[in-house]
Image (cartoon, grey):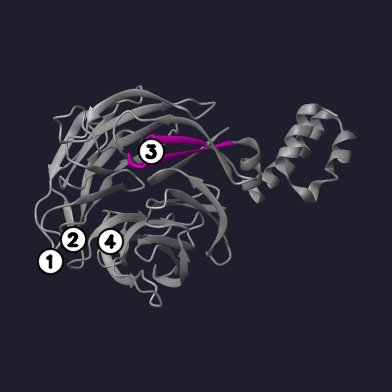
């Protein structure tokens, strides 16, 4: 038996073909390869998660507030079988690296720090890191000023040429050109928003997230303070956005915070922090325009909380289910997505496994959801039921001070 063939066959994990080894051993080598290629293809298509789990190292990056003795960015190795993690690196270049973003090529990571480049700088700092291909550890490439105050969200366009940054306190946004070595240029765009909301606590602009379209032509800026989603045209070559956006006015006092596209259907969804609702939009892919369809409540009517604030929103890997987190009731709501209308149907609410769930991460394979509970210094791990979309607590936690954001990377 050729050892390499045996290894490939085992990696396929295709139990139906368990007797194929005897068949292969009795064939000529050339015919063996032909038969084996079919087996491997079927195995990969049928059980991609098994192959991925067996041949990959899993890395989890966690952004935190620099409180409760937090060490900044945590780099963890995740054991999928035992649901355990090992800290392999921590980085504390500046205070409060609260949001992270992977480059599409998975070779670089960008971190938005609340602290400025020096003590007198009211703006934040953006730091670019290279990722070690064998370990997932980070090495600093360069750092630049975020230009605005209190950066709260960072994202990368799908072509990997532009980084987008949102500033909550400053109510503005900035963009950066990605350099050949993965580092960042100084800010290439800086746009200040103005206005206010009917909500008594929102008297000025508060930018919260910039989400690029899947084709990279547009980026959608959610401004919580002025109840607007603004569509900016992106110049990929220059790393800039045009200054005259198309404005989509949301419901007064709703506070749009985060935004997500359906992975395959022409719909988009806005999590509204202040009204604890999710707004549903149809998406015109020819020009990127949004048309409102309706809104749905996030809260569990059977629970009472004096304070509630929607936080994060993500789809399941198959796009059948949509999840959104709430601080106050401290839960995740599960919605079923209607493939024809894009409408959402509430399936249930799952306790977050801690207090004050901020961002959460749907596992790249689709088996787990990781929820960052900031006030209880833990990331709770949930199993995903792919038939119902519901989440089940594993009672496994990753203990990290003040976790805010979670990213995941597979290393082959």
Vertical position of residue 341 compared to residue 225: above or below: below
Mark closest to the chain's N terminus, 1 or 2: 1
**Residue contact between numbered discs 1 and 4, judged by CB atoms under 8 Å:** no
Residue at image position (37%, 57%) is: 356
Which is closer to the viewer, label 4 or label 2? Answer: 4
Q: Report, in whole angstroms, how far the alpha carbon at label 3 lies from the one at label 2.
A: 33 Å
**Image: magenta residue range:** 57-76
Identify the residue at the far front of this view.
Answer: 68
Q: Is residue 64 magenta?
A: yes
Mark 1 and mark 2 in contact? Answer it, CB < 8 Å. yes
On whether residue 318 falls in the magenta region, the answer is no
Secondary structure of the residue carrying tag 2 is loop
Q: Residue at x 36, y 69 (%)?
A: 298
* Nearest to N terminus: mark 1 or mark 3: 3
The numbered dot on residue 70 is 3
Residue 150 in the image: above or below residue 105: below
Report if the CB atoms under discs 3 and 4 are less than 8 Å apart: no
Left or right: 340 as drawn, with respect to 223? right
Where is residue 164 shown, x and y percent of the image? 27, 40
User: Residue 39: image x %, image y %?
Assistant: 74, 43
Q: Secondary structure at mark 1?
A: loop
Relative image position of residue 107 (x, y in whole percent): 44, 29
Q: Which residue is mark 1?
A: 198
Tell me the tag on residue 273: 4
Q: Secondary structure at mark 3?
A: loop
Alpha carbon of mark 1 to alpha carbon of mark 3: how far? 37 Å
Question: 360 or 66: nearer the eye?
Answer: 66
Q: State the residue position of label 2.
A: 227
**How many residues crowd mark 1 within 10 Å: few (<14), some (14–19), many (20+)?**
some
3D distance between C-alphas at marks 4 and 2 = 10 Å
First in residue order: circle 4 vs circle 2: 2
CA separation, marks 1 and 2? 9 Å
């Amino acid at each position: 038996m050729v050892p390499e063939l045996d290894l490939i066959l085992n990696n396929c994990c295709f139990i139906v073909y368990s007797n194929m080894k005897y068949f292969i051993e009795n064939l000529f080598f050339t015919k063996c390869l032909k038969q084996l290629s079919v087996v491997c293809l079927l195995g990969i298509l049928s059980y991609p998660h098994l192959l991925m789990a067996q041949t990959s190292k899993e890395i989890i990056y966690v952004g935190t507030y620099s409180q409760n003795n937090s060490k900044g960015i945590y780099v963890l190795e995740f054991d999928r079988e035992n649901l355990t993690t090992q800290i392999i690196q921590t980085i504390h270049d500046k205070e409060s690296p609260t949001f992270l973003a992977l480059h599409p090529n998975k070779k670089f990571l960008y971190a938005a720090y609340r602290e400025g480049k020096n003590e007198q700088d009211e703006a934040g700092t953006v730091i670019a890191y290279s990722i070690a291909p064998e370990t997932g550890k980070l090495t600093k490439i360069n750092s630049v000023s975020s230009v605005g105050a209190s950066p709260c969200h960072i994202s990368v366009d799908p072509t990997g040429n532009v980084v987008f940054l949102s500033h909550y306190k400053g109510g503005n946004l900035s963009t950066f050109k990605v350099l050949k070595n993965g580092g960042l240029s100084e800010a290439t765009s800086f746009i200040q928003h103005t206005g206010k909301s009917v909500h008594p606590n929102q008297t000025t602009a508060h930018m919260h997230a910039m989400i690029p379209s899947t084709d990279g032509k547009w980026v959608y800026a959610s401004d919580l303070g002025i109840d607007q989603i603004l569509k900016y045209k992106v110049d990929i070559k220059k790393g800039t956005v045009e200054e005259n956006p198309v404005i989509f006015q949301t419901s007064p006092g709703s506070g749009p915070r985060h935004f997500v596209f359906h992975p395959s259907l022409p719909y988009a969804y806005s999590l509204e922090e202040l009204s604890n609702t999710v707004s549903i939009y149809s998406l015109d892919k020819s020009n990127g325009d949004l048309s409102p369809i309706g809104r749905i409540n996030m809260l569990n009517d059977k629970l009472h909380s004096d304070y509630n604030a929607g936080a994060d929103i993500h789809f399941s890997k198959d796009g059948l289910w949509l999840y959104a987190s709430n601080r106050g009731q401290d839960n995740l709501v599960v919605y079923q997505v209607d493939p024809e209308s894009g409408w959402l149907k509430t399936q249930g609410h799952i306790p977050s496994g801690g207090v004050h769930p901020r961002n959460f991460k749907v596992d790249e394979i689709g088996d787990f959801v990781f929820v960052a509970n900031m006030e209880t210094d833990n990331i709770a791990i949930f199993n995903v039921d792919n038939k119902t979309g519901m989440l089940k607590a594993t009672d496994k936690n990753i203990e990290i001070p003040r976790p805010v954001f979670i990213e995941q990377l597979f290393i082959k």
